[in-house]
Amino acid sequence: DEMTATKKTPIILNKGQMSQNKDMYSRWGIKIPLVFSFVNAFVITLFGIIGTFFAQWFISFIDSVELPSIMYFWKENLKYLLGANIIFYIFMFILGMILFYSCLLMWNGHRTGVNLYAIGKSATLLLPILFFSLRGVAIGDIMIGVLFIAYYYLYMFRHLMTSPSQKTD
């Protein structure tokens, strides 16, 4: 049962499928930006874990640290974020894991990872807005997120494998 480029890779891959059934080329053009996406997914996952289990400890730590006055805005925003509902952090953890898995799919040449990344990243950008209203808007994060989504889609459409003979990446 050979998979062609017209069939999409399933979202959840069975054991051994990660290196098989590739439907896009995975070269340095996607692997270099993917390093940043892996780091971003790790930070989002870590933020979810910290907020779920260690939020009160971090708030008391931030209060005890003497920071320069220029850091006041950052300190207050971080305390505000850490005071969020635990459901926010559970969602952030889950979305971080989805982003990590989607990056792993793209790294191995599966275009399903691009779609999964777009959904996960969009949800990651919208979640703070849903929980914190306009205080959750981070224009820089939104611009960089949209830029990465657009880049991955452009890469995918320009580097699709069109025949089984091309699948020797």
Image (cartoon, rainbow, N blue to C red):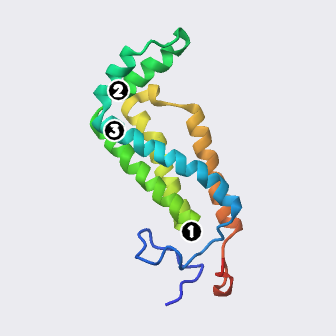
Residue type at the position of mark 3: Phe
The residue under label 1 is 108
Residue 15, given in percent of the width and then of the height, sits at 41, 76
Q: Which class describes the residues within 10 Å of circle 3: few (<14), some (14-19), or many (20+)?
A: some
Q: Disc 3 to disc 2, how far (Cα)? A: 16 Å
The amino acid beneath tag 1 is Asn
| Quarter of image, res 139 | top right
Closer to the chain start, of discs 3 and 2, is: 2
Please give left or right for residue 136 compared with residue 37 in the image: left
Task: Determine whether the residue tagged by mark 2 lies in a helix, strand or loop.
Answer: helix
Location of residue 29 with respect to 72 vertically, above or below: below
Report which residue position mark 3 lands on.
88
Decide if residue 65 is on the left or right side of residue 40. left
Q: Give the answer, above or below, for where 58 lies relative to 161.
A: above
Q: Secondary structure at mark 1?
A: loop
Tag 2: amino acid: Phe
| Residue furthest top in the image | 69
Dot 2 corresponds to which residue? 58
Q: Nearer the viewer, mark 3 or mark 2?
A: 2
Dot 2 alpha-carbon crowd within 10 angstroms: few under 14, some 14 to 19, many 20 or more: some
- For label 1, the crowd category at 10 Å Cα-Cα, with few meaning under 14, some 14 to 19 and many 20 or more, is many
